Image: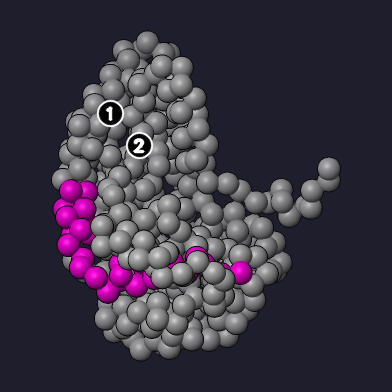
């Protein structure tokens, strides 16, 4: 069968491939610690589960509005107003199954051959894949360890051309856990306004933050109407499998995205949307407890990694990932990730899965128990010691 040429340009989220590899080893009897998958290991709070059951009993089981149920869109608008200080018209709110479709639809609706999109590298790989799929040019701005994996704003500015249509931001950031400062956000907003560029701001980790408060570019002067502001329930409420994402989009983008929804998935399951109203409007203690536990795990894993000769790790300020530098081990990070999994039973992702500037790093998700983290650290230390002892040279 001959596939279309553009399929060659579509990438994949490799975390799922590494998970499959790890599971194959487990099936053969190996004990594997999973640090590859980016999802909270907590249960979805009971009030949200109960709201979904009630909605099923109430018959929210049919097709519904492609853009999303109006009461949920109103709730999302209220949430953005409360957290970003912006007035949001629910007509500009879009609900999709998970946050990912909003990336897909927005990029598809906005970009084409000849356009350029600036994005941080490393980054969640779907962005680069989607930009390439549209035929537009993906223009990376490296996130460097020396800047705690934040943008060098001058470098970002130097990448802007008359063809730049989109700047992609993600803070708190996957895979490094970095967080843009208010000054960073202000400077990027000025660039976007000056050059009339749309910004896609992925804020899905907004609540998993260990210090300070979340700063959204949508709150900056002139930005509300040029920002695609993406968030969702997957991370904040441990609801990755429910599939519920939401966004505020510029007015001109709302109807094109609804058309893409109508041509693909029709709508988002309405009983999940009813549960989403409960998630946003109901008690928030579970999230606070989850973040407190993530903070303890972050401190544990960063401290442990920094004790291993050849590895150094910046303290992340958000999300639930660390991005240690493993250049000192003298082994390519892809090979080291394979070696960790195959010979030491620790599943991690090489930094290159997030872009070329991730070379020399690993991404570890600490969304697992402290006990697992301690065991993983022992295994990583043993693996690193074997390398420095020359066992694998
Ligand atoms: C930066 C970022 N955006 C979006 C997503 C996808 O979210 P969802 O599972 O709601 O589609 C992820 C998932 O890992 C992510 O890391």
Horizontal and vertical percent for residue 98? 47, 61
For the question of whether residue 356 can be seen, the reply is no
Of residues 143 and 262, which is closer to you in this image? Answer: 262
Horizontal and vertical percent for residue 16? 50, 40
Of residues 182 and 249, which is closer to you in this image? Answer: 249
Q: Is 12 drawn above or below residue 71 in the view shown?
A: above
Could you say whether the residue bearing mark 2 is in a helix, strand or loop? Answer: loop
Q: Is 130 drawn above or below residue 336 in the view shown?
A: below
Mark 2 in CB contact with mark 1 (< 8 angstroms): yes
Residue at which label 2 appears: 35
Disc ID at residue 302: none
Q: Where are the magenta residues, as a range?
A: 266-294
Q: Is residue 113 left or right of residue 72?
A: right
Horizontal and vertical percent for residue 330? 39, 25
The secondary structure that dominates the magenta segment is: helix
| Residue sitting farthest toward the right | 1
Q: How many marks?
A: 2
Q: Quadrant of residue 79?
A: bottom left
Q: CA distance from mark 2 to mark 1?
A: 9 Å
> Does 273 lie within the magenta span?
yes
Residue at which label 1 appears: 376
Q: Quadrant of the N terminus?
A: top right
Q: Residue at position x 65%, y 51% from top?
A: 10
Q: Residue at position x 42%, y 57% from top?
A: 242
Of residues 29 and 335, which is closer to you in this image? Answer: 29
Q: Residue at position x 51%, y 51% from top?
A: 125
């Amino acid at each position: 069968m001959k596939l279309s040429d553009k399929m060659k340009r579509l990438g994949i989220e490799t975390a799922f491939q590494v998970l499959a590899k790890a599971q194959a080893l487990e099936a053969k009897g190996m004990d594997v610690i999973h640090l590859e998958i980016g999802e909270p290991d907590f249960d979805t709070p009971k009030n949200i589960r109960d709201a979904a059951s009630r909605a099923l009993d109430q018959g929210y089981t049919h097709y519904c509005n492609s853009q999303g149920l109006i009461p949920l869109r109103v709730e999302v608008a209220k949430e953005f107003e409360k957290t970003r200080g912006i007035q949001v018209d629910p007509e500009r709110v879009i609900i999709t199954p998970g946050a990912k479709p909003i990336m897909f639809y927005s990029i598809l609706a906005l970009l084409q051959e000849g356009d350029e999109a600036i994005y941080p590298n490393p980054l969640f790989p779907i962005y680069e894949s989607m930009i390439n799929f549209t035929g537009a040019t993906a223009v990376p701005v490296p996130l460097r360890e020396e800047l705690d994996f934040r943008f060098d704003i001058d470098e970002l500015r130097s990448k802007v051309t008359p063809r730049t249509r989109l700047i992609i931001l993600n803070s708190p950031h996957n895979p490094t856990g970095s967080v843009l400062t208010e000054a960073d956000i202000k400077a990027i907003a000025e660039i976007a306004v000056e050059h009339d560029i749309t910004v896609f701001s992925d804020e899905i980790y907004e609540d998993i933050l260990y210090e300070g408060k979340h700063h959204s570019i949508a709150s900056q002067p002139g930005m509300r109407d040029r920002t695609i502001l993406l968030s969702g329930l997957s991370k904040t409420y441990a609801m990755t499998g429910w599939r519920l994402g939401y966004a505020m989009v510029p007015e001109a983008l709302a109807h094109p995205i609804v058309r893409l929804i109508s041509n693909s998935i029709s709508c988002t399951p309405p009983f999940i949307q009813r549960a989403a109203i409960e998630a946003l409007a109901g008690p928030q203690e579970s999230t606070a407890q989850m973040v407190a536990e993530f903070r303890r795990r972050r401190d544990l894993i960063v401290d442990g990694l920094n004790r291993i000769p050849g590895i150094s790790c910046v303290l992340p300020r958000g999300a639930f990932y660390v991005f240690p530098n493993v250049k000192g081990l003298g082994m390519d990070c892809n090979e080291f990730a394979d070696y960790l999994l195959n010979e030491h039973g620790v599943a991690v992702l090489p930094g290159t899965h997030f872009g070329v500037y991730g070379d020399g790093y690993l991404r570890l998700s600490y969304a697992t128990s402290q006990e697992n983290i301690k065991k993983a650290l022992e295994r990583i230390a043993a693996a690193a010691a074997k390398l420095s002892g020359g066992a694998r040279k």
